[in-house]
Image (spheres, helix red, strand yellow):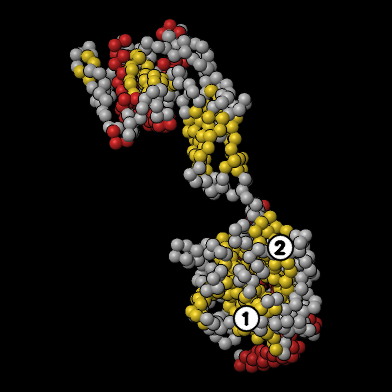
Amino acid sequence: MNYFVRILLMSLCVICMLQVGAQSVTNSKTKKADKAFAVEEYNKAADLYKKAYSKTKNRALKAEITFKQAECYRLSGNTKRAESYYKRALKTKYPDVVVYLRYADMLKKNAKYTEALVQYKKYVKLNPTDIRGEKGVKSCQLAVDWEANPTRYKIALMPIINSKYNDFSPAFGNKEYTEIYFTSSRKGSAGTDIDGRTGESFTDIYKTRIDKKAKWRSPTAEMETINTDANEGALYLNQRGSTMYFTKCKVEKKKQLGCDIYVSQRKGKLWGEAQLLQIKVDSGTTVGHPAVTDDESTIFFSSDQKGGYGGKDIWVVQKIKRNQWSEPMNLGPAINTSGDEMFPFIHADGTLYFASDGHIGMGGLDIYKSVPDSNLSFTSVINLKSPVNSPGDDFGMIIERKDERGYFTSNRKGGKGGDDIYQFELPPLIFTLQGVVTDSRTGAILTDANVQIIGSDGNSDDAKTDNAGSYNYKIKPITSYELVASMEGYLKKKKTLTTVGVEHNKDFVVDFELDPVVKEIILPKIEYDYAKWDLREKSIEDLDGLIKTLNENPNIAIELRSHTDYRGTDAQNQILSQKRADACINYLIENGIDAERLSARGMGESEPLVMEYKDGKLKKGDVLTKAYIDGLRRRKHREEAHQYNRRTTFKVISQEYVPKPKEEVKEIEVEGPTIELEDKKKEDVKKPAEDLSDQK
């Protein structure tokens, strides 16, 4: 036994020595690559990792190098290569489950939402505590819908400004919006070195303006006091265009030294020497992307300083006095995430726009907005969706003060280079309203009918229907409307509509069918239990509709009539119909209708119904008399005819009622007439309905 144990231990030692040897060989090969990666020279690091990969045969080390290559491509913005190398890392069994997340992220940025969704779900199973997985799942699901249902924003690639290099972070140069400053890595920059992260020149700030022909001129970078051999960009200019706040990222011996915000004052046509903005942050902290309020008393910026929620967060400082600022305050978890929040812009109305890769979104960086609440705090974010956002990186939005129009940056497909500047505009919503007014009984069009429209904004207007009975209006966004159609000889009708919450152009159609005032109108849902007069729930629905009609026509008075079928004696049916009519009147009064506008009349069986349309065996024009009903063979058809005769109607008897002031309208309890039955008992209409077994 001891012999075999010794052999086993010796074998394990040999294996470990071989692995350590392989590791040391690879470490020597990847040392330069790791060093380049550490100083963010990702393109150089990727080439060095490629060489190291070819010189090792150890599978685990090959998987590790492959993953590092993928990281280089991801961080340098080459999403297609990054996707390919993360996929290879998975095949070579790279052990860290984060490879699923990275692979999914690249698939999403390359608009492969279905494939990305599969990888995010795998990551959720392997690492359920990391919310990035669930956010990725939701992002893919929503992105498909957002692409299929874009918002009303119209976007276009800016002419002249863009090059085959990176052009990004526009800023307004004046309050007329005729000048734009932006950042570019195009050839001709002040520095001669190449940025190891991008493989392009260091960035400078460029300027363009609209000429007399309303065209943008070719950009220039003639700002010697601003542009240096460092990276300059992501800037803000005040309303007068006299003060520039911009980001400068210094590099020394190919090492990134972090970024700071600088300020320069314009003197005539020249910019003065830039001064470091004294924001209190820890040493080695990166600070950039200034967004300044109109009065220049508040600055929002992006920073990776301690106390944040993830990579880079958005912070804010307040001016205490000249050249002195408050301690930075983090905007909190509603805005900041475990990812990066950058490129803020503060609108004149207080709305914050920013870019993030940590919120639910369509690709890499998406643009979001947050409207401050009553306490001036930012508590929620809104994704601007497609077409502003895309599977790529979208950031650096600026917006005019009055119109929802401006510019942003994107590296989406269809651009001219890497990052490109796009212009956008939100066209005004267009809502139209049209309809036809007709006679409810005959269907005839009503010409010269009046349709009044009353808006929640306090405006109102009237229109007359034309020879086709039509009317039309243009209506406004975020407004509710009340429509009242009227014509002499007809009851008024009121309808409502709203454009609140409607986010796309829409043609509203609202037709009216007006009831002639001479017409006796049947309330079809008013039905009663056998030999009773208390109201059913369906009956109340019809009476509520009648209340609406009375309120819409405050000058009419009505007579409400109740009819029975012919079964039972004339006296009994008269009593029952009167009680039913009185029950309806009482309900109307209890719901605010003045008793002086109402009268109740029990018709008994005296007026059999004349059918106005065909219903089974009952034909249009049939008069449902006793003889007609008795002539129907089937009991079912006889019962249907009886039900038609048991009806309640109302008729306009006056259009001259003058509404009383509200305080004069009293809740009057109407008592029905005292009725003497065969057993000489007196009944009151307010008494609960009782059994009258031979009545219906």
> Which quadrant, please, contains the C terminus?
top left
> Mark 1 sits on what residue?
262
> Mark 2 sits on what residue?
422
Badge nearest the viewer, 1 or 2? 1
**Image position of 634 (left or right of 580):** right
In the image, is residue 64 above or below residue 380? below
Front residue of this view, candidates 443 and 247 = 247
Marks 1 and 2, how far apart in space? 26 Å
Q: Amino acid at mark 1?
A: Tyr
In the image, is residue 321 above or below residue 571? below
| Residue plotted at (77% across, 79% down) | 189
Q: Is residue 415 visible?
A: no
| Residue plotted at (42% across, 24% down) | 523
Tell me the crowding category of disc 1: few under 14, some 14 to 19, or many 20 or more residues within 10 angstroms, Cα based. many
Rendered image: mark on residue 1: none
In the image, is residue 252 above or below residue 354? below
> Which quadrant, please, contains the N terminus?
bottom right
Q: Is residue 52 visible?
A: yes
In percent of width and height, residue 153 lies at 66, 55
In percent of width and height, residue 30 lies at 74, 86
In percent of width and height, residue 464 lies at 56, 30
Residue, far top: 627
| Residue plotted at (33% across, 20% down) | 600
Circles 1 and 2 in contact, beta carbons < 8 Å: no
Front residue of this view, candidates 285 and 346 = 346
What is the secondary structure assignment of the residue under circle 1?
strand
Q: Amino acid at mark 2?
A: Tyr
In percent of width and height, residue 656 lies at 39, 23
| Residue plotted at (51% across, 71% down) | 331
Q: Quadrant of residue 561?
A: top left
